[in-house]
Image (cartoon, rainbow, N blue to C red):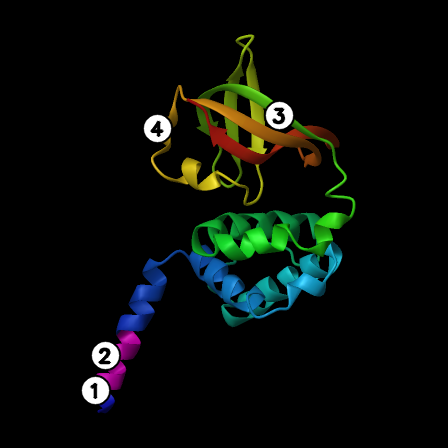
Amino acid sequence: MKRISLLLFVFFTINLSAQDIMDVFAQETCECISKKNIESLSQEQINLELGFCIMQSLSKHTGEYEEKYPVNINDPVSFSKFGEQIGFRMAARCPAILQKVATTNGNSGQEANKPVSEMVGTIKAIRGTDISFLVIKDIKGRDQTFVWLRYFNGSDLLMDDFDDLIGQKVKITYALVEMYSPKAKDYYNQKEIKGIQLME
């Protein structure tokens, strides 16, 4: 019996190490936030709950991620960027929960009041590693870049077989969002994707 337990422990340890620790964070954060009653929370409270869930997961894996994914939990910018990376992984594991987070009462505040625009064009490329940028060629032949920060309607289309979508005509919904550029050491406006739809 002890030998079986030891083998199971070794198997679990090998399997966990083979899996990227960020995937573990994403899964545990999904499980944590799914237990929260977020419908009654404001956007600020939801963000705090998400941060708490991420911190809870980090505390379980001290020493397993710091070298590959350095993060300063006392620095809001560093922790926010780290949280965004986990958010991208969460999109593949609990998209329904992320959609629920995005459409709760918190969206009745400042985030929801941002003007939303639409544009029709053809998909040209997707760039980036931790943060993805979608390049769309508009009807005037100009390249327009959109940042993919969180779950949105149609994001599953981009996650599966993206190469097959090159050249496809789409309608994209977006809103301007303020982002920080470490290189420029200043803030700038970027078009954030709010939804995407294939057109015939």
State yes or no: discs 2 and 1 in contact (Cβ < 8 Å).
yes
User: Mainly helix, strand or loop, the magenta region?
Assistant: helix
Total labels: the figure holds 4
Q: Which amino acid type is marked by label 1? A: Arg
Quadrant holding the C terminus: top left
Q: Which residue is mark 4?
A: 163
State yes or no: discs 2 and 3 in contact (Cβ < 8 Å).
no
**Whole-number angstrom distance, CA of label 2 to CA of label 3:** 56 Å
The answer to whether any part of residue 184 appears in the image is: no
Does label 4 or label 3 sit earlier along the sequence? 3
**Whole-number angstrom distance, CA of label 3 to CA of label 1:** 61 Å
Question: Quick check: 18 above or below 148?
Answer: below
Q: Which residue is mark 3?
A: 118
| Residue at the image point whose x is 68% and y is 57% from the top | 47
State the image coordinates of residue 58 (x, y, percent, origin top left). Answer: 55, 65
Q: Is residue 7 magenta?
A: yes
The span picked out in magenta is 3-10
**Whole-number angstrom distance, CA of label 4 to CA of label 1:** 48 Å
State the image coordinates of residue 81 (x, y, percent, origin top left). Answer: 61, 47
- Which of pointers 3 and 1 indicates the residue nearer the eye? 3
State the image coordinates of residue 170 (x, y, percent, origin top left). Answer: 48, 24
Does label 3 or label 1 sit earlier along the sequence? 1
- Which of pointers 4 and 3 indicates the residue nearer the eye? 3
Does label 2 or label 3 sit earlier along the sequence? 2
